[in-house]
Image: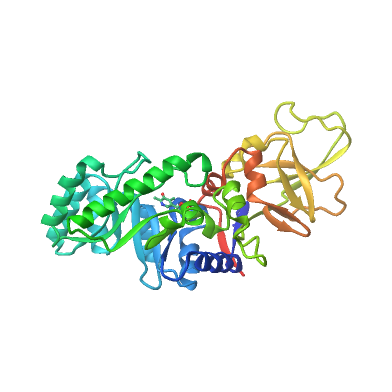
Amino acid sequence: MRHTSYIEISRQAYRQNMDFLKTDIGPKIEISVVVKGNAYGHGIENIVLLAEENGISHFSTFSADEAIQVHNSSKTGSEVMIMGMLENEDLEEIIQKGISFYVFEFDRLMEAINVAKKLQIKAKIHVEVETGFHRTGFEWEEKERLLKILNENCEQLSLKGLCTHYAGAESISNYVRVRKQIKLYKKFKNWFEAQGLFFEKYHTACSAATLLYPETKMDLVRIGITSYGFWPTQETYMYRFQSLPSTNKNPLKRLISWKSSVLNIKSVKMGEFIGYGSSYMAPRDMKIALVPIGYGHGYSRLLSNQGKVLISGKIVFVTGTVTMNSIAVDVTDLEKVKKGDEVVIIGVQGEFEITVASFGESSQQVNYELLTRLPLDIPRKIVE
Ligand SMILES: *Cc1c(COP(=O)(O)O)cnc(C)c1O
C-alpha cells in the first residue's frame, strides 16, 4: 500500500552537520544527540543509526519510552539519558537497562534508591538544579537535604551528571537571565565540590548555549536542532556568522525532505470556487492538481491560499483551503504535469527549494514545532 507522502533523511547532510559541530565544539567535549520528539520528526531509529555512524555514543530523550527505543536501536551500546518524564513504575526497567536519568525532586530520587537497592544495580542519575528556567530542578534551599541523601546512598547511586537548562539562550533578549543562570549553576557546582561531592560530568548547554556561550559547554553538550541542520534562531546564525570559517559560511544542512505525488488533475472554469467555501475564486480558466497531504499530516491550515510546493521543478501555490487530507495547487502554467508526478513539500526539486523556515514562517511555527508535528506514520527513509 502506498502512503500519501514520505520523508527522506540525508546521510551526507547529517555527516556535514556533525563534522561542523565536532570541529566547533572541540575534541574534549562529548556530544549527546538529543532525539526527543521522534528525533525532531526524523525518526529515532534513523538518527541513532546515522549518529553512531558518525561516532556518537550518547543520546538524550525526554521520556522513558523514547529512551528504550534508542536503547533498542543502538548498535554500539550507546549511553542513553532521560531528561524528563519517567514514572516510578518504569524505574526498574530503566535501571536494569543501564539508562541514566535526570532527578529533579525527592520522590524520584528516593524511589530510584529503593529500586537500585532491590536490584543491586546502581542507578545512574543526573542531578538537575533549578537556575531560572522554572520547570524542573532542585532549588538552592534544598541542597543540604539533597547532599545528605546523595552521600548516605552512594552505594546505590552513580552520579553521572550535574545539569541545568537555560531559559532561551537563542535570543539576546534573555542575556541577563541566562547569565544569572550560569552564575547560579556554578554556585551549585562549587558548593557540592566544597562538600566533597563530585559528579562525573557537568553539562548545561543545548545548541544555542553551545554556539553562543562557550563557557556553558563544560564536559558534555546536549545538541538537538543544529544536528538536524537548523540554527536555533536566525539571531543565533547572525551572531555566529563572522566567526564561521570563510570557506563554510553555511555549515548546517537540512536532512529532511518531505515529498508526495499528484493524486488528480482537474480543469476549473474562470469564476468557479475551489475547495470548501469561497476563499478562492478562479481568476482564469485553471488547471488544478490535488496533492494528498493536509492538516491531518501536519500541513497547517494557515497555509490555505498561502503555501507553496514544487512540481515539475516549478514553484506552485496552494489554492483554496487546506483540508484534512489534501491541498489543491495551481498548475495551470505547467505543460506536462500528470497524475503520479513528484510533489516536494520540503526540499529541492530542480533549481528551487522549499525550506523548513519559509514553510514555518508562513504557518507561524518555529522549526522545532513544524518538524516534531510531522506524523509518526509517514514513512521515513535514509538516502545518501
Ligand atoms: C531539547 C533540549 C535540549 C536540546 O535543545 P536544542 O535547542 O534542540 O539543541 C537540551 N537540553 C534539554 C534539557 C532539552 O530539553
Residue 18, given in percent of the width and then of the height, sits at: 53, 66
Is residue 2 visible from the viewing direction of this image?
no
Q: For the point 82% across and 53% down, which residue is it?
A: 337
Q: Is residue 322 left or right of residue 61?
A: right
Which quadrant of the figure contains the C terminus? Answer: bottom right
Question: Between residues 28 and 257, which one lies in front from this camera angle?
Answer: 28
Q: Residue furthest left?
A: 152
Q: Residue at x 56, y 59 (%)?
A: 380
* Residue 229: % across, % down: 58, 58
Which quarter of the image is occupied by the N terminus? bottom right
From the viewer's side, name the closer residue of 275 and 177.
Answer: 177
Q: Is residue 67 left or right of residue 242?
A: left
- Does residue 311 appear to the left or right of 33 in the view shown? right
Above or below: residue 270 compared with residue 328: above
Coloring applied to the structure: rainbow
Give x and y (percent) for residue 194: 20, 56
